[in-house]
């Protein structure tokens, strides 16, 4: 995973391979194309650099290009914000501070308090390699009880890709799982010497049949907002609009909040779930009804 030159080459090849000359506005040249997408000389022309320089870039032999070259290359290959960030990471030399963080991540008391304040919706804090650093009670009920797992197993990618229950509980599982792999790819570019991430990738490669194809696609993603859908065994269908925020002072921690419309069926279902699963000291004084098992 620490082979920066190989990672850069594979990433650039995969990105130019998805753009046809017609999409790039290049005229037909009559040459037979053995592979889809742009050739190196075409990508170089679009970026305004020589073919020789682009080739050295793609082979990892031209390090630390100017910001102007990086911007031109990103524009030529039509990179989205996550891909631009990943390209910058791959083109930079890791500093000593970024060479394989191994110290445990800690969640500030203020973030823990925020999770408690957001008790009416699922919320959790993700760290490096999608480690679940903290989660409120509804997040543990809607996804899985991360607090009950051994510390090394409290990981969102491991849950989505390896827990059989996740395939049944997570709506559109294949899309969500593939997006999570893309998040790991982005993290790998940022922290190329993270042994725990390398170990996680190895485990997922061995145990998840779909993982290798998604990993080799070189897709990257920084999740910011979107939709989530779950099939909960107690309360049925749950639909959320999630928002993700980088924690102030720590770009390696992300607060994820699953929002709901107060008048939606999901909001009502969460109220039922809260009453049925509340600890004794928080439970309502009336006797709660017996929760039915929802159809999948």
Image: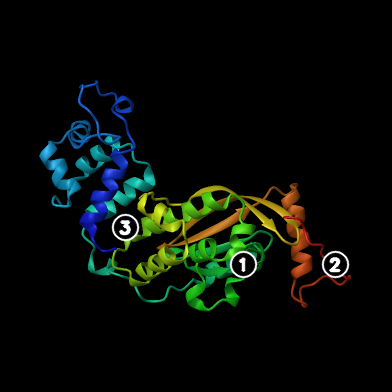
Q: Secondary structure at mark 1?
A: loop
Task: Give residue 118's position: percent from left, percent from top.
Answer: 64, 61
Q: Is residue 5 above or below residue 25?
A: below
The answer to which of marks 1 and 3 sits earlier in the sequence is 1
For the residues bearing labels 1 and 3, Cβ distance under 8 angstroms: no
Q: Residue at x 49, y 62 (%)?
A: 157
Numbered-mark total: 3
Compute the Cα span from label 2 to label 3. 49 Å
User: In front: 143, or 105?
Assistant: 143
| Residue 249 appears in view | no
**Is 114 positioned to the left or the right of 46 in the image?**
right
The quarter of the picture where residue 26 lies is top left
Quadrant where the C terminus lies?
bottom right
The quarter of the picture where residue 159 lies is bottom right
Residue behind mark 2 = 290
Q: Which mark is residue 75?
A: none
Q: Residue at x 28, y 67 (%)?
A: 193
**Dot 3 alpha-carbon crowd within 10 angstroms: few under 14, some 14 to 19, many 20 or more:** many
Task: Give residue 285's position: percent from left, percent from top.
Answer: 86, 72
**Dot 2 alpha-carbon crowd within 10 angstroms: few under 14, some 14 to 19, many 20 or more:** few
Quadrant where the N terminus lies?
bottom left
Q: Secondary structure at mark 3?
A: helix
Task: State the colouring used for the structure image.
Answer: rainbow
The answer to which of marks 2 and 3 sits earlier in the sequence is 3
Residue behind mark 3 = 189
Compute the Cα span from label 1 to label 3. 28 Å
Q: Which mark is residue 144?
A: 1
Q: Secondary structure at mark 2?
A: loop
Q: Residue at x 24, y 39 (%)?
A: 73
The answer to which of marks 2 and 1 sits earlier in the sequence is 1
Compute the Cα span from label 2 to label 1. 21 Å
| Residue 267 appears in view | yes
């Amino acid at each position: 995973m620490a082979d920066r030159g190989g990672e850069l080459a594979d990433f650039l090849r995969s990105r130019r391979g998805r753009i046809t000359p017609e999409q790039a506005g290049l005229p037909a040249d009559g040459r037979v194309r053995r592979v889809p997408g742009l050739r190196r000389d075409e990508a170089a022309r679009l970026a305004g650099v020589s073919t020789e320089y682009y080739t050295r870039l793609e082979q990892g032999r031209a390090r630390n290009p100017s910001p102007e070259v990086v911007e031109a290359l990103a524009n030529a290959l039509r990179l989205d914000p996550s891909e631009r960030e990943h390209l910058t990471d791959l083109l930079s030399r890791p500093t000593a501070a970024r060479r394989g963080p191994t110290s445990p991540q800690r969640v500030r008391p203020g973030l823990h308090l925020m999770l408690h304040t957001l008790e009416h919706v699922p919320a959790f804090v993700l760290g490096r390699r999608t480690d679940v650093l903290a989660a409120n009670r509804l997040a543990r009920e809607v996804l899985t009880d991360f607090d009950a797992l051994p510390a090394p197993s409290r990981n969102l990618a491991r849950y989505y890709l390896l827990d059989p229950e996740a395939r049944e509980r997570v709506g559109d599982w294949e899309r969500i799982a593939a997006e999570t792999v893309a998040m790991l790819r982005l993290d790998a570019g940022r922290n190329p010497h993270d042994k725990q991430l390398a170990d996680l990738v190895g485990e997922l490669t061995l145990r998840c049949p779909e993982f290798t194809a998604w990993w080799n696609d070189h897709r990257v993603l920084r999740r910011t907002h979107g939709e989530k859908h779950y099939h909960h065994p107690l309360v049925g269908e749950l639909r959320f609009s999630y928002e993700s925020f980088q924690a102030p002072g720590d770009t390696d921690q992300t607060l994820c909040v699953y929002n709901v419309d107060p008048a939606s069926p999901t909001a009502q279902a969460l109220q039922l779930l809260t009453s049925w699963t509340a600890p004794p000291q928080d439970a309502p004084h009336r006797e709660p009804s017996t929760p039915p098992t929802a159809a999948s």
